[in-house]
Amino acid sequence: MKNHDCCTPNRSRRDFLLKSASGLGALSLLDLFGAAHAQPAAEAPNLGSLGAGQIPARAKRVICLHMLGAISHVDTFDYKPTLARMHGQDLPQSVRETQRLSTMSGGQSAFPIVGPLRPFKQRGESGAWVSDFLPYTAEIADELCFVKSLHTEHVNHDPASKFLHTGFQLAGRPSAGAWVSYALGSDNRDLPNFIVMNSGVSQGVPQDAAIWGPGFLPSHHQGVEFRASDDPVLYVNNPQGIDRADRRALLDSLAKLAALQHEESNDPDILSRVSQYEMAYRMQSSVPEVADISGEPKAVLDMYGPDVMKPGTFARNCLIARRLAERGVKYQTIFHLGWDLHLAIKQNFPLRCGEIDQPAAALVMDLKQRGLLDDTLVMFGSEFGRTPFAQGQIDNPLVGRDHHGGCFTWWFAGGGVKRGYTHGETDEFSYNIVKDPVHIHDLNATLLHVLGLDHERVTFRFQGRDYRLTDVHGKVVHEILA
Amino acid sequence: MQDFVFFLGRFHVLALHLPISIVIAAVALDFLARRPRHAALAQASPFLWGAAALSAVLTAALGYMHFAEGGFSGPSAEAHRLWGSVTALAAVAAWWLARGGDRAGALRLGAGLSMLVLVSITGHYGGNLTHGTTFLQEYAPSFLRGLIGAAPRRPPVTSVAAADPYLDVVQPLLEQRCGTCHNDDKRNGGFSVGSYDSTLVGGDTGRAFVPGNIEASEALYRTSLPPDDDAFMPAEGKTPLTAQQVAILRWWVAAGAPRDTTVGAVGAPGNVEPLLAAQLGLGGAAAVTAATAPSATADAKLVASLTAAGLLARQVSQSDARLVVSPSAPGTAVEAATLAALASAAAEIVDLNLAGTGLDDEGLRAIGPLPAVTHLRLARNSLTDAALEGLAASPQLTHLNLYGNAALTDAGLDALGQIATLRELYVWQTGVTASGVAQLRARRPELVVDFGAQATTTAR
């Protein structure tokens, strides 16, 4: 929350001087008002700050499936027979070199290789390797584009997750979804542009709203979190004794007061708040409609698996994500927690995979049969990968794998990316990248590119400099685009 | 106080026009007054010369104030100051002569003509300061250039490969965009593009062009900043370099700032060559326009009419004004007004999404032909086979989504197979049968017919 008397944050000092000097300051203020609340959002479409993409878009929306805590790439997609062959032997020092390890395994005297926990097979016509842990994903391998050469600098969840979603390791930068909302606006005036859902149990992995925060962008671009319940947004319903007309009258009066306050302070947060009140008003009908899956045929529910009947599961969230995509929501991030298996990976990894495999594959195929995969980009992965070597003793049944940022795998589907394609390659230990590295900044640059945005030209001036999602980095990975 | 002096000094460039025009007027008047018919004009002569003297002294004084700002050095600046001072003094003398009795004498005329020469010389040097010393030479015929000792005009370039990267490309470009403030006489910021050496050396804030190092080249940095940045060049709202011109300079720096050679010998990549051709006036303009697609804006009235009808209309991109249209609240039913708005905008729509809007055959017919549409999303409506005949009028249709239109049958599917441009067809949850889909797939193997996930995936 900003001090309303401290500044005029929505215009630069120079702008302000120029506008006051030419006597237009007052007029533009009036404009701002006219746009903001004379029965506003119902009429004016929200096309975002750019009005239109800078390049032709390949997709209109994104669904990001983030396995928070870091899914093991060596047990899912990055098949390395060497690891099975050398199970129990130390990862050669020449491979590990002097790379930073987390403090959790950094003190180990030995780094014994743990082979893939289950066998891999080549799948579909593309012949992509997918572990037996993911039979449903395996079945749709020909729809997917694997990038096996993602890498990040970070070795811990919190900075790595913020880096993945906001392009920076500390809190305070806008999340990719907020950037997209800011740049491109909305395709459905009744729902937020950026929605976040969570499932699973964190097991101590930190996760906070800064990952889907608006940073310095106007605050209404922040991701709206849907709760794990049949009633995804708290208090969106009218309390007893208040009907919709009362609510409308209240909002109208409130908007008038806000207008007065804004005239005094010129604080853009006031406009953000008013627009959010209006959004909440419209969400009173749109959210229950989205959350109500009673109209879904059994065959569709069966695709997502039995968990879909339980609110707050990954399966239910995937179904809701499809329903939101259908309704034009631009950006969704769905977290599934519980992947941070430093301990007892053999026991827990099958459970986690069971929770996400069928729903993720179903989401892709359900979008596809509705013709939505064509303009929706689905992406699946983690903030980093996991080590091919053991954390703890190799013969301990509760052995785990530690964090590994040097290489990890994401898959993409739809949205103008290649089908049945694999990009990038790691060494025989799945520890280092040997071909076509893709940095997190490159991932974000590509993501924006797919949506019709030039990551170098989507900027916001804050504290005297132009910020962007990819800072001064990022290269679009054209190789994966169809 | 100093600032106020500088402030006044800037009026020099306004005031200087007074002595020039008044001197011309006074000399002309003196000549005219020699003829008996206009003898009466002679009475005005002292007044005019007085005005000339006054304005000349004032202009010179303002000139000294302007000079005090700094940034003026070199022969033209010195000469301008010297000749300006002389002109002011001479104007006072001319006024003194004009007050004397001999109003039409030879001495007076001589003094008048001398004044003309003086203001011309002063004005010329002043002009060199603001426009650069080569301002007059630039389009001068070669024989004139020879007379004034300027380098002969470069022979016209006939091919990109034969052009000199510095003399034909970079030097004229810099002269045009930077030369007015950064020349050998008016070295704003200590920088001049007057010669190859001074161009590379740069000014007070660093080396302007570092051969082979784009990052270290101050001029490339400054010209690439956002226009509202304090350090952006050209300053003060002067015409900025185009993106193409910056690209040319980057190429030149990356190539090591070559001179006395040819573009052919240096080598220009495919994306730079059309830019060079355009810069050299060799007709690369068309290629450049295509490469840097200009911005385009959709017809505002059309967009407003779609908006008023409850639709969201987006441009394909900032450089493509064709429209992507969907309901602004997806899933709301279409009304007659919506259909009418769509009909009037039909020619501009490339992507139309009317999924789940209750659209029926009559509604689709009301929209009429969609000649530009490539993506047509009509899922979850109540369309029948009959409605699909109109799609033949969409010669660019590649993506057609009809899933959830229960009344659609194999007959309609067969008709859709006739649309040669079609690449993706969605018919899940329709009356279409598996055998109908199989037949279509056999007939059109390149057409992806999606018949639902259950139908396409094998049993696990």
Image (spheres, grey):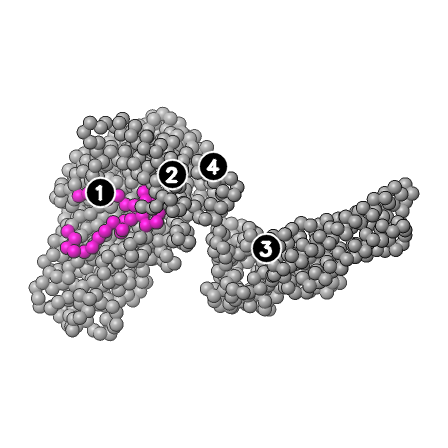
Q: Residues within 10 Å of mark 1 (few under 14, many from 20)?
A: many
- Which of these two is toward me, B440 or A183? A183
Give the residue at mark 4.
Answer: A27
Q: CA distance from mark 1 to mark 3?
A: 64 Å
- Which of these two is toward me, A427 or A28? A28
Label 2 residue SS = helix
Label 3 residue SS = loop
Label 1 residue SS = strand
Query: Are the residues flagged by discs 2 and 3 from a single subunit?
Result: no
Query: Are the residues flagged by discs 4 and 2 from a single subunit?
Result: yes
User: What chain does mark 3 sit on?
Assistant: B
Classify residue B404 by image quadrant: top left
Badge 4 or badge 1: first in the primary sequence? 4
- Amino acid, disc 4: Leu
Q: Nearer the viewer, mark 1 or mark 3?
A: 3
Give the residue at mark 1.
Answer: A226
Badge 1 or badge 2: first in the primary sequence? 1
Task: Look at the numbered discs 4 and 1 and tell me whether their residues touch, using CB distance below 8 Å.
Answer: no
Q: Residue at x 37, y 57 (%)?
A: A471
Classify residue A372 by image quadrant: top left
Type of secondary structure dominating the magenta stretch: loop
Q: Nearer the viewer, mark 4 or mark 1?
A: 4
- How far across and how far down the image is residue B368, in percent? 39, 29
Q: Residue at x 16, y 63 (%)?
A: A401
Residue A205 among magenta residues = yes
Instruction: Point out the stretch of residues depicted in magenta.
Output: A201-228
Q: Nearer the viewer, mark 3 or mark 4?
A: 3
Examine the rendered structure and indicate whether residue B254 appears above or below residue B285: below
Q: Which disc is residue A262 wearing?
A: 2
Give the residue at mark 3.
Answer: B1
